[in-house]
């Protein structure tokens, strides 16, 4: 299977991001904390879903509550951690 692009919505550090992959070779480059591993984890989660649909047993995971993008907000002298929305992953092969 070749993935041409993925879309991440409210997934970890990304509010909305689209990544296009070259058909032959793609390299992810960035500083620590830039989101490279997040892109790879999103691909792994989507592949796990595909394997489950094919009834192939994997040790893969699913999107968890902690994968939803969060932000810190202060209200009335208290600090709250809130989510921006439900995490969604989309891919096109």
Image (cartoon, helix red, strand yellow):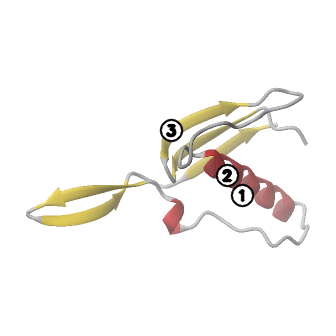
* Mark with earlier residue (1, 3): 3
In the image, is 61 to the left or to the right of 9? right
Q: Quadrant of the N terminus?
A: top right
The mark found on residue 16 in the picture is 3
The x, y position of residue 85, in whole percent, is 42, 52
Q: Is residue 31 left or right of residue 84?
A: right
Quadrant showing the C terminus? top right
Of label 2 and label 3, which has the lower sequence position? 3
Residue 42: image tag: 2
Q: CA distance from mark 1 to mark 3?
A: 17 Å
**Which element carries disc 3, helix, strand or loop?**
strand
Q: Residue at x 23, y 56 (%)?
A: 73
Residue 36 percent coordinates (x, y): 64, 45
In the image, residue 33 sits, relative to residue 75, either above or below, namely: above
**Which residue is located at x 21 percent, y 65 percent?**
79
Cα distance, mark 2 to mark 1? 5 Å
Crowd around label 2: few <14 · some 14–19 · many ≥20 (10 Å): many
Query: Which residue occupies 18% across, 58% down?
Result: 74
Q: Which residue is mark 1?
A: 45
Q: Which image quadrant for residue 76?
A: bottom left
- Asked whether 58 or 34 is in front, the reply is 34
Mark 2 near mark 1, Cβ–Cβ under 8 Å?
A: yes
């Amino acid at each position: 299977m070749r993935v041409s692009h993925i879309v991440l919505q409210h997934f970890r550090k990304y509010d909305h991001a689209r990544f296009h992959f070259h058909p032959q070779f793609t390299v992810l480059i960035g500083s620590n904390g830039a989101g490279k591993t997040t892109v790879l984890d999103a691909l792994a989660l989507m592949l796990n879903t595909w394997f489950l649909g094919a009834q192939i047993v994997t040790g893969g995971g699913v999107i968890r509550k902690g994968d939803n993008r969060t932000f810190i907000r202060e209200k009335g002298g208290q600090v709250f951690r809130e989510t921006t929305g439900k995490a969604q992953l989309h891919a096109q092969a």
